[in-house]
Amino acid sequence: MRECPDCGETVFKLKIAEKQFKIVKCKSCGFIYLLNPPDEKEIYEDYYEIQYSPEDYKPDSKYGFLSEIHLINLQRVSLLKKIGANGKLLDIGCGTGLFMNIATQNGFEIEGTDVSRKALDFAKSGFGLNVYRKTLDDLIDEKKTYDVITLWHVVEHFLEPVIELNKIFQLLKPNGYCIIEVPNFNSIKFRLSGKKWKGGNHPLYHRSFFTGKSLMNILEKSGFRSKRIKISYKIPSKGKLYNLSKRIFNIFAMDTFLDFIAYRK
């Protein structure tokens, strides 16, 4: 039986059962996690469905989702500039390099790492990015350090988030920034959706499920001090009411995503 990745206890309450997957809440600390994670050896080679070319990644792409991702990544880079983040950047879980592409165009010196060979091949051949298939332990052994580390929808994939985030803490230079975004288990969308797994939180891939409180607790246990960012991406095509509701939900930590800035003490 899997122990709680936060406190190590094994007493839990079932939250959601989806086919063979069981998402449970620890009765000791309240952390929500996947009780029975599947083997990870090959599932991430099927994680990325790449049906587009590098030339399709632009604001007016014929693929609507790529236009939205392009706009979101521009806002992510604007956030980094706003908080004064600069220097050498590591994008963990870089995927096909869509964020890295925008960051590079905006002057960041950036490296990326991911587990998917297919995604890394696309990032390297399509955008000419500096990406590799290395673990956090590999980077620590190489004595790598970074001024900025980004994890856009990555931490929820960690089987042991405290341990992995502590490794990231070691890779971050003093006074550096670690920017984290995860799906919000406490979001209005997740609470109301009949198709809970569409677009996020799918237990096939996700091991840990965060609320604002639990993510802050995990970060502090990993060595960081942190604060939640009240950021909601503006998507003009979604309409004013959609964007307004996102901002309101974000105030109460009930938006679709949670964003945190973590600092090295």
Image: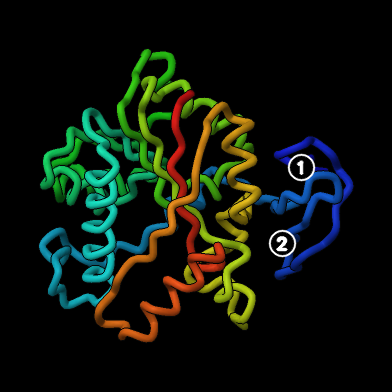
Percent coordinates x, y for residue 245 in the rendering? 44, 79
Q: Which residue is mark 1?
A: 4
Q: Nearer the viewer, residue 252 or 166?
A: 252
Residue depicted at 50% across the width and 54% down the height = 182
Check whether the beta carbons of the residues at disc 1 and disc 2 lie within 8 A of each other: no
Give the mark, 1 or 2, whose residue is nearer the N terminus: 1
Most distant residue in the right direction: 11
Residue 136 seen: no
Percent coordinates x, y for residue 201 in the rendering? 57, 62
Q: Nearer the viewer, residue 134 or 179?
A: 179
Q: Dot 1 lies on which element?
A: loop
Picture quadrant of residue 115: top left
The mark found on residue 140 in the picture is none
Residue depicted at 34% across the width and 37% down the height = 113
Residue depicted at 51% across the width and 73% down the height = 198
The mark found on residue 21 in the picture is 2
Looking at the image, is 117 positioned above or below residue 67? above
- How crowded is the residue under tag 1: few (<14 C-alpha within 10 Å), some, or many (20+)? many
What residue type is disc 1 on?
A: Cys
Quarter the N terminus occupies: top right
What residue type is disc 2 on?
A: Phe
Residue 47 seen: yes
Residue depicted at 36% across the width and 28% down the height = 176
Q: Is residue 204 left or right of residue 33?
A: left
Percent coordinates x, y for residue 106 in the rendering? 12, 46
